[in-house]
Amino acid sequence: MADCELTCGCRLSEKAKQLDIIFAQACEAFCNSSRDVASVAARWSEQSLRLAVVLHGVIHGVHAGSEEISPETMTSAQNIAKWFAGQYYRLVLQARLEAMKEIFEDLKIRFGPKPDDPSAGSDHCAPWQVAKSKYAKNIKEATELMKRLSVNGLGQWDENPSGSNRPMVGLWWDTDN
């Protein structure tokens, strides 16, 4: 964004341009690592530049067009943008965790112990079972989902040795054992 002409007549100092480029690169790296919020995160750099123009206007008033945007103003704008980004990302993570809790509870109802029939159900579910549900298309997707559930404190992913040559793999409901 630093190579673009600002329509307000403001200019970035050389150091502010460098800060803008570094921030844009950091935003791009975040977009590549967090695809679910990439469409929003892609705009964070642009928004920080808008915030810099606003802060610059507040500082310099009617003379803002004749002054360069300082590195301090750019840093302040980027800090504000980072704060808003963090708030947004926190909301996304909360929504994601709620969705994962719903998946976990549904899997537990389907495959877990049945209160009215203790002999029915199991203390865990296996990837092949989840692969047959609406949550995964195949065993690989099911395994990834089950591991994500476990990482988020929903059950315990484990690979237990069994009496046969194949380990017992799955997500255990009760994490106290």
Image (tube, rainbow, N blue to C red):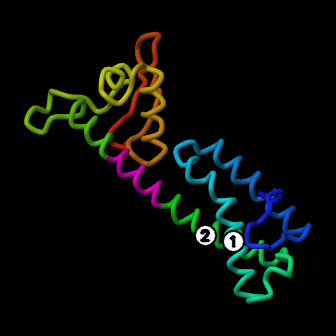
Q: What residue type is labelled 1?
A: Asn
Residue 7 drawn at (x, y percent)? 74, 67
Residue carrying label 1? 79
In the image: residue 20, left or right of residue 132: right
Q: Distance between the residues labelled 2 and 1?
A: 6 Å
Contact (CB < 8 A) between labels 2 and 1? yes
Element at label 1:
helix
**Residue 125 percent across, percent down from the top left:** 33, 28
**Magenta segment boundaries in residue numbering:** 91-101
Specify whether residue 96 is painted magenta.
yes
Residue 136 relative to residue 89: left or right: left
Q: Residue at x 85, y 68 (%)?
A: 16
Residue 35 among magenta residues: no
Q: Which residue is drawn at 37% across and 44% down?
A: 100
Secondary structure found at label 2: helix
Quarter of the image where one finds residue 33: top right
